[in-house]
Image: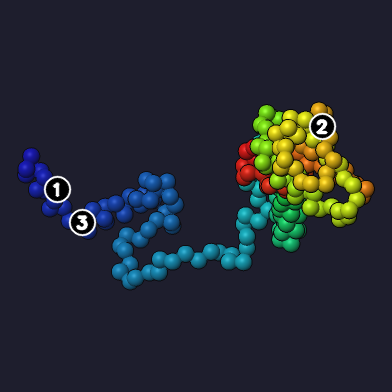
Amino acid sequence: MSDRFARARAVDAGALGAAMAAMHGGFAAGLGMPAEAAPPAAADPSPAPRHFRPAAPGARPTAGWDPFDPMGDGRFGPRPADPSPAPPPAACDNEAIRAEAYAAGLAAGRAEAAEAGATGAALTAIADRLAAMATLQHARLAERLRATVLHLTAQIVGEAVPPAELTAARIAAAAALIVDRTAPAGLRLNPEDAVAIGDHLPHGLAVTGDAALARGAFVIETRDGEIMDGPDQWLARLHAALDAVPLGPAPAGGAA
């Protein structure tokens, strides 16, 4: 086997080519090609260009060809319609957007301001009512204190009996106020005081006992008028003094 392989390698290439060229039609006939188109037996050793040049450079062989109907007979159905172009985006009006945002913010601000104003007015009304209630409670307390003072004072004055010496001194002070000492004057006082005072009464007064007068009370009657003093006058002056006292401000916090 090795001898055959050696003899095959020893075949001359030129003899093989001459044998094939002697065949009818050459090697190209075996490939189904005409003899004139067969390649030359030996390659041309000179280099040849390998770039492509179209036969008709200005022609467009695919002009008018529809890829959806390549055969031109509509066998693949109707050609799909071209999609409608998307509408162009609307122009952005910055001034309109700014004006709309400003109007919305202004309306919201006014609404919040109105709500805050209503809340403030309601709180102010509540505070005023609380202040009025505090003032009323303060006035009621002051009136109760005043009535309590008058009641306790009247009770003390009504139960207490002034000393005879003090009553005589008060009568003498009142008699000194008489302008016309030459005119007759009378003195009315409680009968018990008249007995207790005795000789301590000032001269020139006609003394008369009057059980309607409380202990410590007296009335000096003259041509020009009367001079009265006693527990009833004391309580009246205390009443007037309490009425003249101004009512102080209510304590902070509305506490009465």
Which badge, 3 or 1, comes first in the chain's sequence?
1
Q: Amino acid at mark 2?
A: Gly
Residue under circle 1? 8
Q: Position of residue 220 (x, y in %)?
A: 84, 43
* Picture residue at 77% right of the left edge, 30% below the top: 191
* Picture residue at 63% right of the left edge, 44% below the top: 251
Residue 248 visible in the picture: yes
In the image, taking residue 210 as reference, residue 111 lies left or right, namely left
The circle drawn on residue 214 is: none
Name the one closer to the observer, 91 or 54.
91
Q: For numbered disc 3, what is the local secondary structure? A: helix
Which badge, 3 or 2, comes first in the chain's sequence?
3
Question: Alpha carbon of mark 2 to alpha carbon of mark 1: how far?
Answer: 190 Å
Question: Alpha carbon of mark 3 to alpha carbon of mark 2: how far?
Answer: 190 Å
In the image, taking residue 146 as reference, residue 47 lies left or right, namely left
- Tell me which corner region of the image, top left, top right, bottom left or bottom right, holds residue 198: top right
Q: Residues within 10 Å of mark 3 (few under 14, many from 20)?
A: few
Q: Nearer the viewer, mark 2 or mark 1?
A: 2
From what the image shows, is residue 61 above or below residue 73? below
Question: Alpha carbon of mark 3 to alpha carbon of mark 1: how far?
Answer: 11 Å
Which badge, 2 or 1, comes first in the chain's sequence?
1
Residue under circle 2? 209
Q: Nearer the viewer, mark 3 or mark 2?
A: 2
- Tell me which corner region of the image, top left, top right, bottom left or bottom right, holds residue 166: top right
From what the image shows, is residue 56 above or below residue 159? below
- Tell me which corner region of the image, top left, top right, bottom left or bottom right, holds residue 127: top right
Q: Amino acid at mark 1?
A: Ala
Name the one closer to the observer, 3 or 133.
133
Residue under circle 3? 13
From what the image shows, is residue 246 above or below residue 48? above
